[in-house]
């Protein structure tokens, strides 16, 4: 049988997704059940174990397919990028209403009602999706109201269809000083490939999740001499965004933040760990 990337294909000896029948060996094949993330951010792990590292994160309102439930965990596949892993069962809901809007602020507060003086319920990251059922105004501020009566400041949301064509580099720059988090993919913490994926997503464009996936299949390869704003540079295990031909923005373990850095200085600084860049790509 074919050896497939377990990050993108759901298969175990006892169970596999229906689309893999005839491609992998499994005791049973299932189509899965649709569901949505119902918590602000949840880690997706390679095993149902809180001690295991984070592969990536899923944000509120993101769609998943559930293949299995056991021991308080769900084995799922993210609809947006196809990533497979385990999340706590209480982090997803099967009957959640379809999202209508996306959070465009770096972070926003979810209030119990349309009133900024009320103690907030939780914090939602940029890229989170919510279902708006109404609107309200309080003391001159306009809020969008969710089905349960909670509210978000209206300027922090946009309808899903309105995300199109904005400069994704400018969005990436809004992450400057956000903490570095291995596997992170939110306005609370992000890694290098998560920054690329999330910034592109905020302009309505999809991208693979991990650095090796992006280096292999995101956009088209280019030469260093042709680099311009928005192009990507790859090392083995790392990616950065060109703000201009000589400056990069990247989430990195040196500053443990998203940082702006001179490209030549970065190449020299990290050469001992990643060697020389392995390639350059233009996302779209």
Image: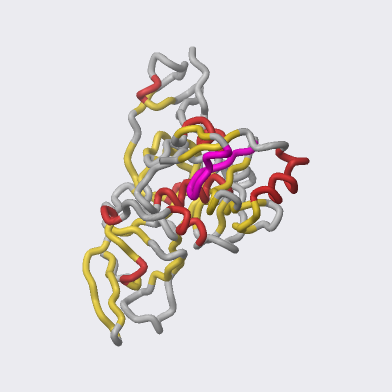
- Residue, far front: 225
Residue 228 included in the magenta stretch of the image: yes
From the top left corner, tell me how far across and down residue 15 is, in percent.
44, 25
Q: Residue at x 45, y 47 (%)?
A: 89
- Residue, far left: 134
Figure check: 219 above or below 72: above
Is residue 62 in view from this perspective? yes
Q: Nearer the viewer, residue 139 or 71?
A: 139
Q: Nearer the viewer, residue 233 or 159?
A: 233
Counting every numbered tag in the picture gives: 0
Q: Nearer the viewer, residue 106 or 3?
A: 106
Residue 256 sits in quarter: bottom right
User: In the picture provided, is 142 more to the left or to the right than 214?
Assistant: left
Q: Nearer the viewer, residue 257 or 220?
A: 220
Q: Which residues are magenta?
A: 224-235
Q: Residue at x 22, y 64 (%)?
A: 133
Residue 106 included in the magenta stretch of the image: no
From the top left corner, tell me how far across and down residue 174 is, in percent.
50, 62
- Residue, far right: 272
Residue 127 sits in quarter: bottom left
Is residue 47 in view from this perspective? no
User: In the picture provided, is 271 more to the left or to the right than 169?
Assistant: right
From the top left corner, tell me how far across and down residue 3 is, in percent.
52, 18
Figure check: 82 above or below 116: above
From the top left corner, tell me how far across and down residue 148 is, in percent.
29, 66
Figure check: 64 above or below 109: above
Which of the image's four quarters has the C terminus?
top left
Q: Residue at x 42, y 70 (%)?
A: 109
């Amino acid at each position: 049988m074919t050896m497939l990337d377990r990050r993108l294909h759901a298969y175990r000896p006892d169970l596999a997704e229906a689309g893999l029948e005839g491609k992998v060996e499994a005791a049973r094949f299932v189509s899965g059940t649709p569901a949505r993330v119902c918590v602000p951010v949840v880690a997706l792990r390679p095993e149902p174990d809180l001690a295991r590292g984070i592969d990536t994160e899923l944000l509120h309102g993101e769609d998943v397919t559930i293949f299995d439930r056991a021991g308080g965990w769900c084995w799922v596949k993210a609809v947006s990028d196809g990533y497979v892993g385990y999340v706590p069962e209480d982090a997803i809901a099967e009957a959640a209403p379809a999202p209508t809007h996306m959070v465009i602020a770096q972070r926003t507060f979810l209030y119990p009602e349309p009133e900024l003086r009320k103690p907030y319920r939780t914090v939602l990251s940029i890229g989170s999706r919510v279902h708006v059922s109404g609107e309200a105004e309080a003391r001159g501020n306009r809020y969008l109201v969710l089905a349960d009566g909670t509210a978000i400041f209206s300027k922090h949301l946009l309808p899903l269809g309105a995300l199109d064509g904005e400069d994704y580099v400018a969005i990436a720059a809004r992450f400057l000083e956000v903490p570095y988090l291995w596997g992170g993919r939110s306005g609370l913490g992000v890694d290098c490939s998560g920054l690329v994926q999330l910034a592109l997503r905020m302009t309505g464009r999809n991208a693979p999740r991990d650095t090796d996936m992006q280096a292999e299949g995101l956009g088209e390869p280019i030469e260093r001499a042709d680099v311009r704003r928005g192009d990507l540079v790859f090392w083995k295990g790392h990616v950065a965004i060109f703000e201009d031909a000589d400056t990069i923005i990247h989430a990195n373990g040196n500053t443990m933040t998203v940082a702006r850095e001179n490209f030549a200085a970065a190449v020299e600084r990290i050469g001992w760990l990643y060697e020389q860049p392995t390639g350059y790509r233009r996302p779209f």
